Image (tube, rainbow, N blue to C red):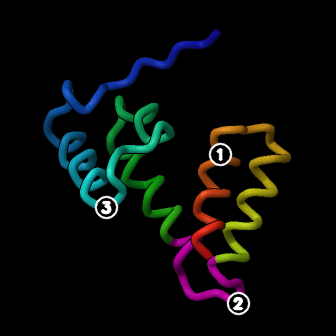
Amino acid sequence: MARIKITDYREASGRLLEIYHDMIRKRGKPAEVHKIQSLRPVSIAKHIDLYLDIMFSKSDLSRADREMMAVVFSIKNGCEYCRLHRAEALNQY
């Protein structure tokens, strides 16, 4: 099994701690996918910017449509974590 070193919230400082604080304020906790990027905090910020653009920018697709597509791709990719995470968001719409 592969192991990815992460910097946990309790060990975070500087920009990473700021990012973690923002995630906690907005979402309640950092997502696992963000924790695995913790050694390069700038990548977390870029990831979040991309996500926000894809899911919230002006589009002919509704937010529910976007979440449904994310669920389908997560299933196709065989990622149980992503499937559960996206399905939870889809259920809000």
Residue 26's label in the rendered image is 3
Front disc: 1 or 2: 1
Q: Quadrant of residue 58?
A: bottom right
- Identify the mark nearer the N-term, 1 or 2: 2
User: Is the residue 20 above or below the residue 64 in the image?
Assistant: above
Q: Which residue is mark 1?
A: 82
Give the position of the C terminus as an image quadrant: bottom right
Q: Foreground residue, 46 or 57?
A: 57
Element under label 3? helix
Q: Position of residue 16 (x, y in %)?
A: 24, 40
Work out how far the residue at label 2 is from the one at label 3, CA to CA, in angstroms. Answer: 26 Å
Q: Residue furthest right?
A: 76
Residue type at mark 2 is: Asp
Q: Which residues are magenta?
A: 53-63
Front disc: 2 or 3: 3
Q: Foreground residue, 24 or 56?
A: 24
Q: Which residue is mark 2?
A: 60
Question: Who's the residue at 43% across and 41% down the image?
Answer: 34
- Identify the mark nearer the N-term, 3 or 1: 3
Residue type at mark 1 is: Cys
Work out how far the residue at label 1 is from the one at label 2, CA to CA, in angstroms. Answer: 24 Å
- Identify the mark nearer the N-term, 2 or 3: 3
